[in-house]
Amino acid sequence: MSAIENLLIGFSIVLIPKNILFCFLGCLIGTLVGVLPGLGPMASIGLLMATTIYLHPITGIIMLAGIYYGAMYGGSTTSILINMPGESASVVTCLDGYQMARQGRAGPALGIAAFGSFIAGTIGTILLMFLAPPLASVALSIGPPEYCCLILTGFMLLVYLAQGSMLKALMMCAVGVILSTVGDDIITGIARFDFGILRLRDGVGLLPVVMGLFGVGEVLIQLEEIAEKKVEIIKTTMKQLLPNQKDWRQSTGPIFRGTILGFLLGIIPGGGALIASFASYTLEKKLSKHPEEFGKGTIIGVAGPETANNAATSGCFVPLLTLGIPSNPVMALLLGALMMHGVRPGPLLINQNPDLFWAIIASMYIGNAMLLVLNLPLIGMWVQVLKIPYQFLFPVIFLLCFVGVYTLNNSFFDIGLLIFFGIIGYLFRKFDFEPAPLVLALVLGPMFENALRQSLIMFDGNVALFFYRPLSAVFISISLIIVITGIASWAKGKKRILSEESIN
């Protein structure tokens, strides 16, 4: 049977009232999870996974999948409105989305995020349907050396395309990598840099760091501006609730580039939505004729990353369904849910459980449409948040931060980390350090270390063998070109400044 015929069978299964209801519930819960910082798709799927044991496997997986890609939709809301990422993948959206809100353009930012997510989710599902088997085989061929060099290239790109000083961005990356080494060694199990604190044996939690740097830090800056009467009043009219023609012209290219890039990065184990959003932002800034506008409220900085992280959500299902390999922790939970129902994902899934496979694909089409219908009418309501005086809004933000961080592990130590990184985030903004490279390095640090050490074990410590593998050699060459180009640009700028000073 053709893919279209199989898809029609999938729709016939999903369109049963019970499955439609649970698909809607998953999308709704996912949107709320994305909007409310702290819970996240991983925690919510973990909490609700046990309840699906009483459901049919297809119904249960449809609901859990809806929570996952629904959270990717909803995560942009608080990033744009109050500069606090609902999900780690929405960190990049803060950079331009929040600036758009401060300029009175929260509506177009939320609108392009919703439309971009719908387009990316739909195209990503089509790609998943037709390209899953061949793309999965490509992803499987990427071993630790290639993955190690790919992450290194990501670090170099992030530093090179930083908004401010490349040196400061490099310092932030280094701090993030150092923080990622805190806790038990991934190979030997020996405790590292935990200062004897038992809570640090599992490492520095991502959530307290993100919420502190982007949530508490931003509140402290805003309170300082209020005290100095520098705070800007955000105004948004009803006419500005949706993107205009100019916004669409600027966003069309980033949306389609972000879709393809996000999907491809989603199928790589460890890639996921966070890396896809950073990569899309980096690519768009590189391609832009006006890179200086990034970080100041350009809609491209919202369209690209938001599209990429939703496309990556579809891409993550490729290795899970066709190889039985989870590409991120959320996919690992879905793998557990499938196995709990007696379903083993892998190459035989399509033949042994075609109804499940094609029902999941069909539910993605329906879920994306549901999410668009859910999100667009809510734009006007979310924009009203901006009309609340900040003196009343900031206690709510603090409450969300503290509750979200505490409920993750029921730990007051995490609240202490939140306060600590909130103060650090405030200082970063005061001295023009970008926190985003630190967050990316914190996430990628363990993956980079693991891939590097596995590679060195494979090569018996011979680093030169990285250049004997074609893909890893390509990534290393790209990294070197980026470093040389960055040094050349810095030297050229320094020379120009010195010449101008000599003339004056």
Image (cartoon, rainbow, N blue to C red):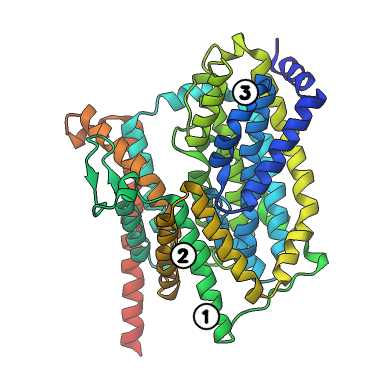
| Mark 2 Cα-neighbour bin, 10 Å: few <14, some 14–19, many ≥20 | many
Question: Does residue 242 lie above or below 52 as drawn?
Answer: below
Quarter residue 223 falls in = bottom right
Say which of 465 and 51 sits in front: 51
Is residue 254 visible in the rendered image? The answer is no
Q: Which residue is mark 2?
A: 163
Question: Does residue 241 lie above or below 67 as drawn?
Answer: below
Place of residue 298 in the rendered image (x, y in percent of width and height, measured from the top left)? 61, 63
Place of residue 499 in the rendered image (x, y in percent of width and height, measured from the top left)? 33, 81
Question: Does residue 75 lie above or below 360 as drawn?
Answer: below
Res. 53 mark: 3
Q: Earlier in the sequence, mark 1 or mark 2?
A: 2
438 left or right, relative to 463: right
Q: Say if mark 1 contacts mark 3, CB within 8 Å.
A: no
User: Given this view, does label 1 or label 2 mark the residue nearer the observer?
Assistant: 1
Quarter residue 82 falls in = bottom right
User: Given this view, does label 1 or label 3 mark the residue nearer the observer?
Assistant: 3
Helix, strand or loop status at disc 1: helix
Helix, strand or loop status at disc 2: loop
Q: Which residue is mark 1?
A: 224
Question: Does residue 136 lie above or below 423 as drawn?
Answer: above
Image quadrant occupied by the C terminus: bottom left
Place of residue 270 in the rendered image (x, y in percent of width and height, measured from the top left)? 44, 36
